[in-house]
Amino acid sequence: MPGNNPKDPLINSDVVFVHDATGSQQPYIDDARKYVLGNIPAIQRKARLQGGEARFRVIAFRDHREQGDLWTIHDSNPFTNDAVEVKKQLNALEASGGGDGPEAQLDALDAVLRSSWRTDAKRTVILVTDSPPHGIQEPGDVVPPSHPTALTPDSIRESYKTAKILLIVVGCSPEIDSYKNAVKWYTEFAKETMGTYVPLHGAAGPPAVTSRALVGSVLHAIDSHRIADRWEDWVLDQASRGQDAIARDLHSKLAAEGEQCHEISCNEHDGHDIQYSLGPVSLARVDNIVARTLRYRDPNESSQLADILWG
């Protein structure tokens, strides 16, 4: 039966950290760079890559020139598996600027698509931000004239589904909670890519909370990729049964095998702490994986198109 071999093939993972570099983000940047030399080896050690390799790069964004920012996105960092090099990429970030609330997230997420992905690598994006993108109908938002007209919230979501990129959004609270549509939009976007939304009270939280959010997010993504790839053919063969039935059966199979995954937990009663842990795969996690897989009824065609578009 497809997916029934518990021995997984090696997994190569390409991870892009997309970091908000507007004025309010300096505490989060500081936390990320402080612990990065331990974080990259921890990911390589804890992730079930089966002999594969994880690479990382950092993209930063602010807002458009109409808001007074000298640059919109910084997209020159290459992929690397060297923690020292990732630290250099983070060290180059300095939070400044930002204007009307919504920022240039769409521009940065679009730049991600042109990354030098390995053809066999699983693609993950970790977006860290405390504001919405332009164009999601936030009260008072005006899309800047310099913003590409073809780059819309809907178009970026379609592009991420086509490219099979898993998105995890780390939303910095309480700032992001003050917006009308931001959390809902990010949550829906992440979920449809098989990712999740992680609320982060970093500035007021315990030490290294941003670090744990980032490491946990990457481990969560790699586990989701691994399960989705292993069971994709089986899920598609069962498509006529419906998502709920498939998810229940797959969860039972994984539980019987003793499958474990990294999950992220947010504890608002302990200084807004974030932890990640390895435990039995949840039905909710399986349901998300099945839902994403069923969006690709012709996975070969989708994969070929993604390779053509994004390399």
Image (cartoon, rainbow, N blue to C red):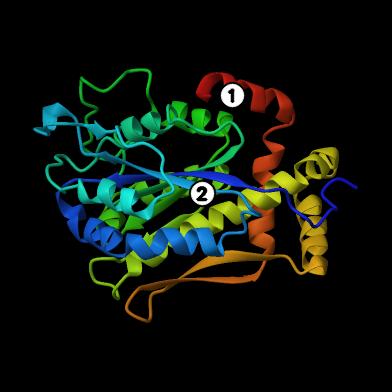
Report whether residue 200 is seen. Answer: no
Q: Residue at x 12, y 34 (%)?
A: 69
Q: Residues within 10 Å of mark 2 (few under 14, many from 20)?
A: many
Relative to the observer, which residue lies in front, 133 or 25? 25
Residue 258 position in % (x across, y down): 76, 69
Q: Is residue 236 above or below residue 213?
A: above
Q: Does residue 220 appear to the left or right of 154 in the view shown?
A: right
Q: Is residue 98 above or below residue 226?
A: above
Q: Residues within 10 Å of mark 1 (few under 14, many from 20)?
A: some
Q: Residue at x 78, y 62 (%)?
A: 254
Q: Residue at x 50, y 53 (%)?
A: 196
Q: Amino acid at mark 1?
A: Asp
Relative to the observer, which residue lies in front, 285 or 57? 57
Q: Is residue 251 above or below residue 119?
A: below
Q: Secondary structure at mark 2?
A: strand
Report whether residue 260 is seen. Answer: yes
Residue 130 position in % (x across, y down): 28, 52
Q: Residue at x 74, y 31 (%)?
A: 297
Q: Secondary structure at mark 1?
A: helix
Determine which of the numbered discs, if any, sits on residue 54 in the image: 2
Q: Amino acid at mark 2?
A: Ala
Query: To which residue does mark 1 refer?
Result: 307
Q: Nearer the viewer, mark 2 or mark 1?
A: 2
